[in-house]
């Protein structure tokens, strides 16, 4: 997991080297490996000298996977390449559709999971995050709506107290209102710090207007609190 709010931690060039058949004039081909947060857009730029970079045409860049093994073919005579980061939009939940329980209708209510994070990166039993009524009573769930339905490929869950209980994530097709499970896993207590738990999956073929998060609350002691939920589209 990587933290999109931490500017030092989500875009790392792991290696950068001329490709095997590199030639500065006839084949200025570089192998680049870097790691990005899902949803992060990156652009490669080239220049003849440091200072005047122009974008490398997308047709000359290949990339795959969360750790991207990229090959970039520079224009002849261009000796420098750099990567620039940018975001796809993270969209925050805008309405509560349903929930299993909530601690109160105000503090720790389901509505506390709407909008951008306002608890994270703080950690603790803080009332600006959703908490269930009881700490370890039952399987809990939260259903949140998003405006402007669009295909997505990642859901980021901001867990700000007793993380690790998420056991299932589903998304809703805005056209059919059918729920589709996109991730499941085994709940297990995570270290007691706030975290952004991001699940990624192949981009949906349909626009998404809601996310359902299931928590195996009994499996992770204490209130498993969620501050915010974002949806993203991996790029490019
Ligand atoms: Ca619990
Ligand atoms: Ca919140």
Image: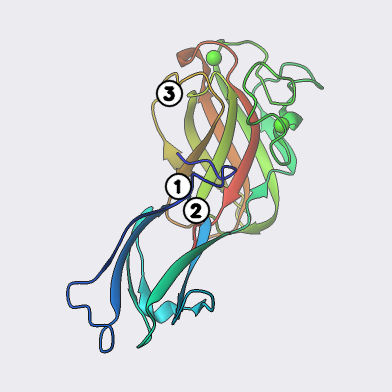
On the image, the x and y values in percent for residue 135 come to 60, 11
Residue at left offset 26%, top offset 84%:
27
Residue at left offset 65%, top offset 25%:
122
- Residue ranking furthest to the right: 106
Q: Are marks 3 and 2 in contact (CB under 8 Å)?
A: no
Residue at left offset 68%, top offset 25%:
130
Residue at left offset 73%, top offset 41%:
115
**Residue at disc 2, secondary structure:** loop
User: Which residue was labeled with disc 3?
Assistant: 187
Q: Are marks 1 and 3 in contact (CB under 8 Å)?
A: no
Is residue 129 found left or right of 138 in the rendered image? right
Q: Compared to 223, does 205 lie above or below?
A: below
Q: Compared to 42, does 186 lie above or below?
A: above
Can residue 65 be spotted in the picture? no
User: Which residue was labeled with disc 2?
Assistant: 153
Q: Quadrant of residue 123?
A: top right
Viewport quadrant of the N terminus: top left
**Residue at disc 1, secondary structure:** strand
On the image, the x and y values in percent for residue 20 come to 17, 72
User: Which residue was labeled with disc 1?
Assistant: 200
- Residue ranking furthest to the left: 20
Instruction: Note whether ligand 2 is within 8 Å of mark 2.
Output: no
Q: Are marks 2 and 1 in contact (CB under 8 Å)?
A: yes
Dot 1 or dot 3, earlier in sequence: 3
Dot 3 or dot 2, earlier in sequence: 2
Q: Compared to 232, does 62 lie above or below?
A: below
Label 3 to label 2: alpha-carbon separation: 21 Å
Is residue 17 found left or right of 108 in the rendered image? left
């Amino acid at each position: 997991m990587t933290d999109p709010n931490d500017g030092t931690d989500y875009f790392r060039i792991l290696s950068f080297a001329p490709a095997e058949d590199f030639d500065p004039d006839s084949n200025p081909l570089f192998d680049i490996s870097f790691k990005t947060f899902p949803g992060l857009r990156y652009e490669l730029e080239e220049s003849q000298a440091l200072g005047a970079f122009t974008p490398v045409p997308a047709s000359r860049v290949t990339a795959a996977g969360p750790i991207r093994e990229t090959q970039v073919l520079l224009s002849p005579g261009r000796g420098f390449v750099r990567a620039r980061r940018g975001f796809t939009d993270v969209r925050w939940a805008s309405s509560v559709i349903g929930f299993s329980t909530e601690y109160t209708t105000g503090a720790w209510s389901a509505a506390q999971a709407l909008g951008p994070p306002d608890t994270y990166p703080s950690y603790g039993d803080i009332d600006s995050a959703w908490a269930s009524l009881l700490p370890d009573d039952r399987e809990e769930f939260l259903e949140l709506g998003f405006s402007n339905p669009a295909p997505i490929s990642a859901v980021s869950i901001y867990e700000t107290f007793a993380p690790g209980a998420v056991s299932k994530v589903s998304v809703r097709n805005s056209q059919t209102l059918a729920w589709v499970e996109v991730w499941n896993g085994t709940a297990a207590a995570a270290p007691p710090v706030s975290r952004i738990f991001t699940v990624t999956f192949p981009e949906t073929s349909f626009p998404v207007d809601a996310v359902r998060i299931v928590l195996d609350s009994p499996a992770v002691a204490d209130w498993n609190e969620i501050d915010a939920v974002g949806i993203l589209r991996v790029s490019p």
